[in-house]
Image (tube, helix red, strand yellow):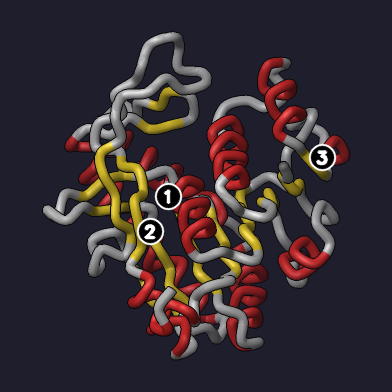
Amino acid sequence: MTASASQVKGAVVIKLGGEVVNGPYLPALAADIAELSRAGKPVVVVHGGGPQATALQKALGQEPNIVGGRRITDKATLDVMKMTVAGQVNVDLCSALLGAGAQPVGLHGASSATVRATKRPPKIVSGGGPDPIDFGYVGDVTGLNEKLLSLLVGAGFIPVLACMGADEQGNVYNINADVVANKVSILLDATALVLVSDVRGVMRDIADPSSRIQKLTLADSKKAIAEGIITKGMIPKVEESFTAIAEGVRAVHVVGKLEKGELFKEVETPGSVGTVLVA
């Protein structure tokens, strides 16, 4: 590890879904993130933009093609991801953080190869049937520009990464935001990875907030998926999280609808606010 990359090691990685950026809880979350940064903790934010992308696709007459909670990305869909994820959502999130007193810097994969990626080969996925699925312009993360991230964090800035990657030839790929956040956490040896969505955690019954599961192991998650307790977009979120845990992430916190101060509480007392995923 070089000295130039050391300042971003041990970061708190916070991943926000696009629904969070559009939602009413963003000001409280932005205030917590700003406070974390002011306290001297290295913070890296990763975000998606699924709802915004779906809305624009439909407005343009495109039909979103989502298999097993994952978006198949053809050329037209990739253009939508650039406009929404790297554009609208990144700007909206940075403006919220700026308003909370933070110093955000919006980035995407092609920003000096902040997120390096290669095209994902066809693969079998849960909920996608028995055959391998070709997801098109979808990438797998191969590395980060740690020097750039460390320069920013060391100067008090918060990198805000859109979930897009790029390869050395300048090809751009759509990547699931949870995948980006997990890889960022692995490569930066994160002290915490917090996945923020529009649900309070993993629920036994999505309609019953009191059914939140405080702690989930790999064996528990496989059983819950098989029994239909974990469904739709929560399947790839949980599966990718356990892949990250297997590669060294200490724990993954699934949270949502956070009031001010709850981000700290969940990190300090895992499972107190959301669901903590552990090996």
Tell me which corner region of the image, top left, top right, bottom left or bottom right, holds residue 261: bottom right
Quick one: quadrant of the C terminus?
A: top right
- Residue 33 or residue 172, whichever sits in front: 172
**Residue matched to label 2:** 162
**Residue matched to label 3:** 212
Residue 266: where, in percent of width, then height?
Answer: 77, 61
Residue plotted at (46% across, 87% down): 154
Could you tell me how many numbered marks the image carries?
3
* Residue 49: mark in rendering: 1
Q: Are marks 3 and 1 in contact (CB under 8 Å)?
A: no
Instruction: Judge the density around disc 1: few (<14), some (14-19), many (≥20) Cα neighbours within 10 Å.
Output: many
- Residue 129 or residue 33, whichever sits in front: 129
Residue plotted at (49% across, 82% down): 7
Alpha-carbon span between mark 2 and mark 3: 29 Å
Residue 203: where, in percent of width, then height?
Answer: 76, 35
* Element at label 1: loop
Query: Looking at the picture, does residue 124 appear above or below residue 79?
Result: above
Instruction: Judge the density around disc 2: few (<14), some (14-19), many (≥20) Cα neighbours within 10 Å.
Output: many
